Amino acid sequence: MSLVVYLDLDRTAYNTDLAGRLIWQEVASSFGIDGDYEFDRQRQFYVYNDESYAYDLSAHLLDLGLSVDNVYGHLRRSSLADGRLEYLGLAEFVSWVRGRGEIKVLTYGVDDYQRLKASLCPSLSGVEIITTLGLKAEYLANKGEVWLVDDKFMANDLPPNVRFLWMLQDGQDAAGRAACRSFADAVKAIMALQ
C-alpha cells in the first residue's frame, strides 16, 4: 500500500509567526501603507467558526482599497517566495514522501490566503493544496489509511483510518506528549510505524 500523507500548513510547513510581520513589511514597502499598524489590526479580519478562527488577508487588503490579485502577485514574485518561510527539512520530507506515495497539504483557513502561503513555500510546488473551514477529521474520515502531520494535537479526535504525527516546530512545549521536532523525526516515525 502506498503512503498518503496530509501535511498541515501553518506552523507545520509554513512559519506563520515569522511570515505575518514580513508580509506586512513587504506590502508596506510596495504599496505605501503603514505595515506595523496593519499587522496590529489583523484581528479585525478574523473569520470565526465554532472554536476556531482564520485570518482573511484578502478582506484586510480590500478594506485598504488594495487589489488582492496585485498584492498576492507581488508577494509571489517577492523575496518572500525564496523558501525563508518554510521550515527546515520540508523539501527533503516532501521528496521522501513522494518517493513512497503522495503528499497533500490539508490546511484550515480562507482558501486564497492559504494558497498564497503555500505558494511562498517552494518545496510545496506541485503539491495539492486542500483548504477547509471545517474539521480535518471529517475531511479525512473516508480517505482510506492516511497520515496527518499537524502542529495541533488532535490524535484523540481523528477517525481510526488516520495515523497522527504531532509536529512541534520552534521549541513549542509538548506537555509530556510524544512529538516530532523536525521533518527528519517525522520520517523516522513513519518508517517505524509502517
Image: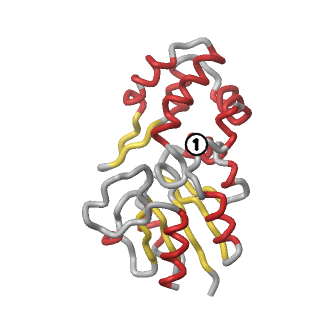
Near-viewer residue (190 or 106): 190
Residue 29: image x %, image y %? 62, 17
Q: Residue furthest bottom?
A: 1
Q: Which residue is mark 1?
A: 85
Which residue type does callout 1 highlight? Leu
Left or right of residue 154, residue 183 in this image: right
Residue drawn at the location 53% of the way across and 59% of the way down: 106
Q: Is residue 58 above or below residue 94?
A: above
Where residue 152 sits, quadrant-wise, is bottom left
Q: Is residue 178 visible?
A: yes
The quarter of the picture where the N terminus appears is: bottom right
Left or right of residue 168, residue 192 in this image: right
Residue 122: image x %, image y %? 69, 49
Residue drawn at the location 58% of the way across and 57% of the way down: 130
Q: Is residue 142 visible?
A: no
Residue 179: image x %, image y %? 38, 66
